[in-house]
Image (cartoon, rainbow, N blue to C red):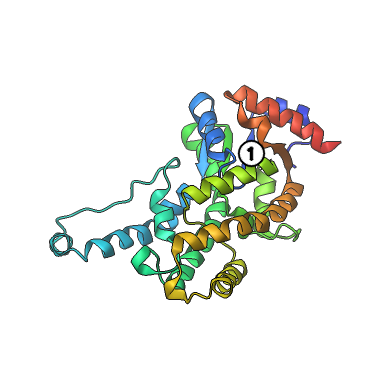
Amino acid sequence: MIYKNSKDWKNSKQKRVLLLAMSGLGKTYVSSMLRAKGDWFHYSIDYRIGTRYMGEHIVDNFKQIAMETPFLADLLRSDSLYIASNITPENLSPLSTYLGKPGDTTKGGIPFEEYRKRQTQHHSAEKSALMDTPHFIERAKQLYGYSNFVCDSGGSICEVVDPWNPKDPILNTLSKNLLLVWIKGSEEHTSELISRFDQAPKPMCYQADFLLDAWQGYQDQTGLGPNKIDPNDFIRWTYARAMAHREPRYAQMANWGITVNNGELKDVSSPEGFENVIYQAIDNNLK
């Protein structure tokens, strides 16, 4: 770890952390709070993906859909219409909408091969965005004068690294520049996330082998062909399996840093409160 102990963390004038956790466990909430109430730069991996690396794909998808309407098509051809993605760290809908859901196109799905292509694009983009982190640490300090830095990682970070490989290039780069903090959820919170997802299923990024197994497993269980699969039903069916798939990967990633429980951060409302939680966690993880 870049901080030898809790005293080293407390006395540091440059506090740098990367928050990693499944979606819904408070990464963006904490990051936004640190940015709003303290001297912290907020680097959102998903925002970087959706702007720098996949922004063109997202906007081209908007344009492709707009071209299906003759009125809009004429305006686009004459450069009379400007289409852009209004993505923000708090609103990543343009990115998730582009990723889409596989299945029956009459129910809002996209063909599975197109879905896999977009998943591959996201994986490549996520790796690049993570490797950009040291650049943004320096940029935040030199350009904006921020000494403290929080990297708000995406929920799929565990899908693009090999936490069991001590030579993993992404984890080595990150751990040399930041304190990796795993926000661990409880079984109760996992059930809550699954229930919330069931009510409002949203696109996700999966590891390639896991996705192929899930796609085939769903067809085997339901007897449905690829073009008859309800996209929302498929991702609901897949979500709980994805959570179970990710848990051991996150647990192994915790060995590259420290672990805090979601409950410890739930009521944190100030940078000082966050810094105290990390202070205690460093001590606990060194025992």
* Residue 63 sits in quarter: bottom left
Q: Is residue 252 visible?
A: yes
Q: In the displayed image of the protein, which residue is found farthest to the front?
A: 222
Q: Is residue 233 above or below residue 283?
A: below
Element type at marker 1?
Answer: strand
Provide residue 233's location: percent of width, then percent of height: 49, 61
Q: Is residue 1 above or below residue 50?
A: above
Q: Report the side of 187 relative to 286 (left or right).
A: left
The foreground one among 186 and 42 is 186
Provide residue 85's location: percent of width, then percent of height: 33, 50
Residue type, mark 1 in image: Val
| Residue shown at the point (67%, 56%) measured from the top left | 244
Q: Quadrant of the N terminus?
A: top right
Q: Which residue is mark 1?
A: 17
| Residue shown at the point (61%, 30%) measured from the top left | 266
Q: How many marks?
A: 1
The foreground one among 71 and 50 is 71
Provide residue 33's location: percent of width, then percent of height: 52, 29
| Residue shown at the point (32%, 62%) measured from the top left | 61
Q: Report the side of 168 relative to 41 (left or right).
A: right
The foreground one among 286 and 193 is 193
* Residue 190 sits in quarter: top right
Q: Quadrant of the C terminus?
A: top right
Provide residue 43's location: percent of width, then percent of height: 52, 42
